[in-house]
Amino acid sequence: MVIYGHFTVGVGDRGSGIGDRVLGRDLLNNFPFPCPPCPFPSSFPIAPYPQRGPRLPQSPFPIAPYPQRGPRLPQSPLPLIPRGDPAFPNPHSPIPIPTMIANSIKILLIEDNLAEARLLQEFLKQAQSHEFTLLNVKRLGDALSLLSNCNEINCDFDVILLDLTLPDSEGLTSLAPLMHQAPTVPIVVLTNTNDDKLALEAVRQGAQDYLVKRQVNVEVLIRALKYAIERKQTLESLRAVNHALEIRVEERTAELVKAQEINQFKSEFVSMLSHDIRNPLNTILLAAGLLQNSGEKLSQEKKLNHYKLIRSAIKNMSQLLDEVSLLGKADSGRLEREFTLLDLQDLCWQIVEEAQLIAADKQITIVFTTTGNPTEALSDENLLRHILGNLLSNAIKYSHPDSIVYFELRFKNQTLIFKIKDEGIGIPLEDQKHLFQAFYRANNVGSTPGTGLGLAIVKKCLEAHGGDISVNSEVGVGTTFTVMLPLIKNSLR
């Protein structure tokens, strides 16, 4: 035990660590170990070294053997933050942190005071755990230029030391541009002011730590840099996981919405289909009942009218079932194409002649024209009939009596253009974006019969044929549909 003044520096009793206040000098003469000479005299008396007392008698009770230690649990690959660490104020909750800090750490120091920059560099040279590379700039603008290559994944620097007093920036206003330029790089603030409010505000705005320059030493600086990097890496990892979870939630929500839309569509589909089939069935049932019960009383003309009603109802049902079947094939990807060499002008004339029967009932005239050089082309006749037949039928259905429907076939370069224009009721602008949805009908169709499947079928057939469609309509003026298809003259190989 070496005595300096009236305090003792522990040498101790055979390693016991006892270091008591002494009151005399006699112990120096009787001390059992060699003692170095006192560097200065002391006038305090020294008490004699206390003698060890007698041992206590042994207990008569047997002592249970010490329990054997069980197998150790596997050590976690993630180190725990020590209890009482100032970086994590709760000492009862060790938090695992990832050890992703490289042995070589690149630091960007933004400090205009050369002496303080050199002092920090000397502190970093004394570090044993990591190798630090320090680059010092004096202005915030210079730092932003160096960080211009940073992105959300990579950056040339691992951490930023930021002085709050710079020639081109003052206070915490420097944080925002740095965080925008290098969002993944942690920032440690340096200042001469020991201000708790400023420290809290710096952390709130995104800094990872706050150091007062006159309180910085090697240990404090290294620990602040290390924890700043670890916390930022943990924060970025959590942010990435959170972003992935948000994307997954959005995807799942979209799936649920789509499932709800499909279920609603199925419900509407069944409702519309049952309604549209029931009407012709009722017509058939009524006409057949009249023929059966009152056939002898009916004239031959009335009988023929009832037979026509039955045939028309059966035709409507057959057409409806064909359209539903076609939509089902298109939705399941089973809509096949069969290209053959067609005389398109002749095909259009056939479609016009078939539509004349409907147009005659409303005194509507169909005007068909051809422009360009008519030629044969490879097309799917069945798909073209669905496309042009539905468009021409709609033009007649929604046109006013005694009006004209224009049907144009145009050969232009390597494109086929079909244009069907009517002078009918037109389509409201808010309905035009929903026109090609199955069972959708514009809100101004009134009592005009229809299933809402025609334009949906047109769209599906065009997609299968590699074409496109556009609509131009004005309420009360009329509607023009333009269909564009590739003109294929040679055989497909």
Image: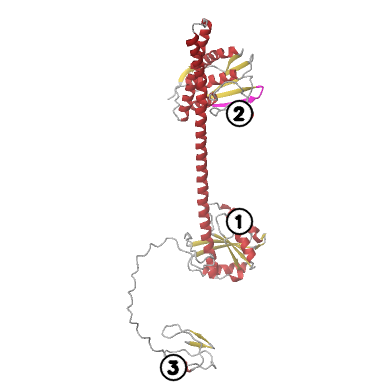
Q: Which residue is mark 2?
A: 432
Tell me if 198 is positioned left or right of 19 in this view: right
Q: Which residue is mark 1?
A: 178
Seen at 51% across and 11% down, the residue is 306
Of the two numbered discs 1 and 3 in the rendering, the one whose residue sits closer to the viewer: 3
Stretch in magenta: 468-477
Q: Is residue 280 above or below residue 166?
A: above
- Mark 2: amino acid: Gln
Badge 3: how crowded within 10 Å, few (<14), some, or many (20+)?
Answer: few
Q: Is residue 296 above or below residue 461?
A: above
Provide residue 410's location: percent of width, then percent of height: 57, 19
Task: Find out whether residue 388 is within the magenta segment.
Answer: no
Provide residue 381's location: percent of width, then percent of height: 48, 19
Of the two numbered discs 1 and 2 in the rendering, the one whose residue sits closer to the viewer: 2
Tell which of 179 and 436 is nearer to you: 436
- Mark 1: amino acid: Leu
Q: Main secondary structure of the magenta part?
A: strand
Q: Which mark is residue 30?
A: 3
Q: How much space separates mark 1 and mark 3, taking CA atoms?
A: 68 Å
Secondary structure type for disc 2 = helix
